[in-house]
Image: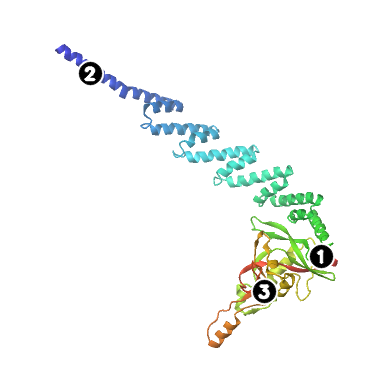
Amino acid sequence: MKKKIIIISSAVVCIFAVILSFTVIVPAVKHHNAEKQIESGNYKDAITLLENLDSDKYQNEILECKYLIGKRSYNSGAYDKAIEELQEIESYKDSATIIVDCKYKTACDLFNAKNYKEAEKKFSEVADYEDSEDYITKCNYNIATELFNSKKYDEAEKLFKQVKDYENSEEMLEKCAYLQGKKLYDEKKYTEALSYLVRARSNSEAQKLIQKIERAGFKNIKEKSSVFFGSNFVGSSDNGQYEPIEWTVLRIEENKALLYSKYVLFNAPYLIDNQLKYASRFDWTISSLYSTKMPWCYSYFFGGLGPDAIITDYKDKKHGVFTLSKEEIEQYYKTDEERIATRADNKTQAAPYWLRCEARDPNIAAMLQAFFDGKDYEVQVCAESVDAYGAISDDRLATEECGVRIAVWVDLSKI
């Protein structure tokens, strides 16, 4: 009986020893081996040991090993490899920051290798990091320069426009425009050439070509035909450009021609607010268009022909630039449909525009009634205009922004 008890006890001890070995001793040994692998920098082997033990229990140690693998790649300059390794644990420690820095340093390496196109893509991925925005500008400038040197002027111009405040981009923009315009001029595509040449405003050769094209357009001038001269800035200050102005020939008498801009060139109020303090009726010469906008146009638009060709005192217009009156618009454009005009910056969008008139309150009867009744009356000064459907009205508030089409009398003997 005692012998049986001893045998059973020995068996229990053996089983316990086996269990202890597999649940405590062996895992401890394996964990110790994993720690040694970590100390030796063998992080992948350590991860394998830890995952075989208990991936949940040793999750933090596994994450740390993966982190150290990524850091090692980062420190050795293997940035693409580091990104791939750290993206798996992006939320661990500063992995996300290191990934961004890897992309930035990759972009810097590409930039230094003069691979500007790929560098720009990489910098764009981390545009808010360090000086990435400056590098993006430099990349685009260098790409534009490469395109220019390859005579791809249209593509180069688009990029130089994006970085127009950087180094000599403005000068390069004009060179691109001139060279494209010159090519079209040589191909006798004069109207297309003009659209490029007007953007090369500082280029003396471009100005000579503009003058030739514009003057040639006046040789066979006739009523209802179109001519081009001058330029207008179209679009926003950040994303606009100069375009040639197209004019409709309304009338020719003796050696003079009345021209009217085909498109609505810009928006402006007829009167400015502080003018309303002083009167309820405003002659055209008091209008803000006459006193500010129009003289600006006169000195600014007429590069190719020169201002000498613009008649500055004809038919009581006082200076060379004006808008048509109601009577004139009805004389030259008989129907509402004919009077519809579109915008210079969007030639599919119809837009209203001012007419030359005496601005006043159209509700004279209501004004007088209020006066006789001793009641207050708020003056609503309005000016005549053509709406987007071609109809003429006199009830548009003069302080509103509205489109402007320009009329000029040209002395044909000076062209």
Give the residue type that dot 2 points to. Val
The residue tagged with tag 3: helix, strand or loop? Answer: loop
| Alpha-carbon span between mark 3 and mark 1 | 32 Å
Hey, what amino acid is under mark 3? Answer: Ser
Look at the numbered disc 2 and give the secondary structure of its residue.
Answer: helix
Q: Quadrant for the C terminus, please.
A: bottom right
What label does residue 12 carry, if any?
A: 2
Judge whether residue 127 can be spotted in this image. yes
On the picture, is 94 further left or further right than 153? left
Find residue 222 and name its label: 1
Q: What's the amino acid at mark 1?
A: Lys
Q: Can residue 163 be seen in this view?
A: no
Q: In which quarter of the image is residue 351?
A: bottom right
10 vs 242, left or right, is left
Question: Which residue bears the numbered disc 3?
Answer: 287
Residue drawn at (73%, 43%) of the image: 149
Location of the N terminus (image quadrant): top left
x and y percentages locating residue 210 in the rendered image? 79, 57
Residue 37 position (above or below residue 301): above
Q: Quadrant of residue 3?
A: top left
Q: Residue 131's mark?
A: none
> Residue 126: percent from the left, percent from the top?
55, 44
- Near-viewer residue (389 or 131): 389
Which sits in the foreground, 243 or 355?
Answer: 355
What x and y, as percent, mark residue 236? 64, 58
At label 1, counting other C-alpha atoms closer than 10 Å, the crowd grade (few under 14, some 14-19, many 20 or more) is: some
